[in-house]
Image (tube, rainbow, N blue to C red):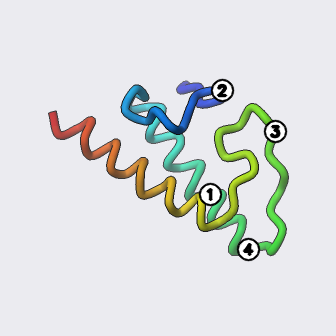
């Protein structure tokens, strides 16, 4: 199981494929949570998505998809 807690989302190029996949799935679930409810559940401080809104999550999702594409391109 990939552990994404306490990892820096500013350094996605250092993440491996399993971690990027888990983060992508987590971001998509978070975005759906925002769409279902106006106020989504608070995340713990150690979670990479802590304090992010829907726009920030969508932006991060784009970055994760690019990082995955770069990882698997080689």
Q: Nearer the viewer, mark 1 or mark 2?
A: 2
In the displayed structure image, the side of residue 30 where residue 19 appears, left or right: left
Which of marks 2 and 3 precedes in the sequence? 2
**Residue 40 place in picture, x, y as percent:** 80, 62
- CA gap, disc 4 and disc 2: 27 Å
What crowding class fits label 2: few (fewer than 14 Cα within 10 Å), some (14-19), or many (20 or more)?
A: few
Which of marks 4 and 3 precedes in the sequence? 4
Q: According to the image, label 1 marks what residue? A: 29
Q: Kindly identify the residue that appears in the image at 56 percent across and 58 percent down.
A: 28
> Does dot 4 land on a helix, a strand or a loop?
helix
Question: Which residue is most to the left?
Answer: 74
In the picture, the disc for residue 36 is 4
17 relative to 38, above or below: above
The answer to the question of whether label 3 and label 4 lie on touching residues, with beta carbons closer than 8 A, is: no
Q: According to the image, label 3 marks what residue? A: 44
In the picture, the disc for residue 70 is none
**Residue 58 place in picture, x, y as percent:** 53, 63
What crowding class fits label 1: few (fewer than 14 Cα within 10 Å), some (14-19), or many (20 or more)?
A: few
63 relative to 23, above or below: below
What crowding class fits label 4: few (fewer than 14 Cα within 10 Å), some (14-19), or many (20 or more)?
A: few
The answer to the question of whether label 4 and label 1 lie on touching residues, with beta carbons closer than 8 A, is: no
**Residue 4 place in picture, x, y as percent:** 59, 30
Which of marks 2 and 1 precedes in the sequence? 2
- CA gap, disc 3 and disc 2: 11 Å
Which of marks 2 and 4 precedes in the sequence? 2
What crowding class fits label 3: few (fewer than 14 Cα within 10 Å), some (14-19), or many (20 or more)?
A: few
- CA gap, disc 1 and disc 2: 19 Å
In the displayed structure image, the side of residue 11 where residue 44 appears, left or right: right
**Residue 18 place in picture, x, y as percent:** 43, 31
The answer to the question of whether label 3 and label 1 lie on touching residues, with beta carbons closer than 8 A, is: no
In the picture, the disc for residue 6 is 2
Front one among 30 and 8? 8
């Amino acid at each position: 199981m990939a552990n994404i807690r306490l990892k820096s989302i500013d350094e996605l190029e250092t993440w491996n494929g399993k971690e990027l996949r888990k983060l992508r799935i987590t971001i998509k679930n978070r975005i759906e949570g925002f769409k279902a409810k106006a106020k989504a559940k608070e995340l713990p401080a150690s979670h990479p998505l802590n304090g992010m809104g829907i726009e920030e999550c969508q932006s991060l999702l784009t970055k994760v998809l690019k990082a995955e594409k770069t990882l698997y391109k080689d």
